[in-house]
Image (cartoon, rainbow, N blue to C red):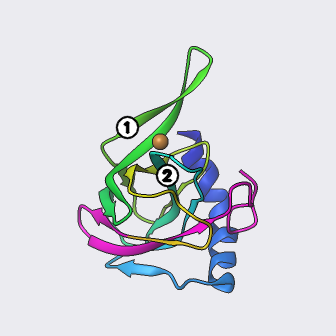
């Protein structure tokens, strides 16, 4: 996908910003997670979205398989595809993580969907959960919830 190629170009800047701004990277084995974030949802919302950068610093491929969050009953990996001129979300079974590559989940592209929210997400809240990888195993994460309309962490627009 072109989004993957695009992400390689911008990821160095993103990672640099992430380190300076706040969170330490989260690691398990060769997998490094940076910048997990989410957006506040309106009252009554059934779903929320999660975004992050996943880097495979190893020499062999891994695969992001899914995960869980405390705030929702379901956790899905989605892509956005254009179908008959309409943007639609499509569920993925995982995301390939080639060695030496960073993959970004971001608005308008691949993302994580928190399905069946137990309550709406509020700005400032942390969404605690865990991500599952084929080889690296489980990595615990906290998605930082930013306000509706606020620019994503890392300084880039949607
Ligand atoms: Cu989705």
Q: Could you say which is closer to the camera, residue 143 or residue 101? A: 143
Marks 2 & 1, CB-CB < 8 Å contact:
no
User: What percent of the width, then of the height, locates residue 128?
Assistant: 40, 72
Q: In the visual, does 33 lie left or right of 134?
A: right
Residue appearing at x 28%, y 64% in the figure = 132
Which residue is the site of mark 2? 48
Q: Quadrant of residue 153?
A: bottom right
Residue at horizontal 52%, vertical 39%? 1
Ligand 1: does it lie within 8 Å of the C-beta at label 1?
yes
Magenta stretch in the rendered image? 129-158
Residue most extreme to the front: 43
Element assignment for label 2 = strand
Question: x, y percentage for residue 98?
Answer: 40, 57
Q: Answer left or right for 64 relative to 87.
A: left
Is residue 32 something that shows in the picture? no
Q: What is the distance, in whole Å, between disc 2 and disc 1 at their CAs?
A: 14 Å
Looking at the image, is mark 2 or mark 1 nearer the viewer?
2
> Residue at coordinates 60% horizontally, 21% vertically from top-left?
86
Q: Which of pointers 2 and 1 lies earlier in the amino acid sequence?
A: 2
């Amino acid at each position: 996908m072109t989004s993957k190629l695009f992400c390689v170009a911008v990821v160095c800047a993103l990672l640099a910003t992430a380190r300076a701004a706040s969170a330490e990277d989260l690691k398990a084995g060769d997998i490094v997670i940076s910048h997990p974030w989410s957006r506040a949802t309106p009252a009554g919302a059934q779903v929320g979205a999660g975004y992050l950068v996943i880097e495979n610093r190893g020499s062999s491929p891994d695969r992001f398989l899914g995960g869980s969050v405390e705030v929702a009953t379901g956790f899905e990996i989605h892509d956005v595809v254009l179908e008959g001129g309409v943007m639609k979300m499509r569920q993925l079974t995982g995301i390939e993580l080639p060695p030496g590559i960073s993959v970004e989940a971001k608005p308008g592209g691949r993302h994580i969907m928190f399905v069946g929210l137990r309550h709406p997400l509020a700005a400032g809240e942390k969404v605690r959960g865990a991500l599952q990888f084929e080889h690296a195993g489980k990595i615990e994460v906290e998605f930082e919830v930013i306000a509706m309309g606020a620019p994503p962490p890392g300084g880039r627009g949607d």
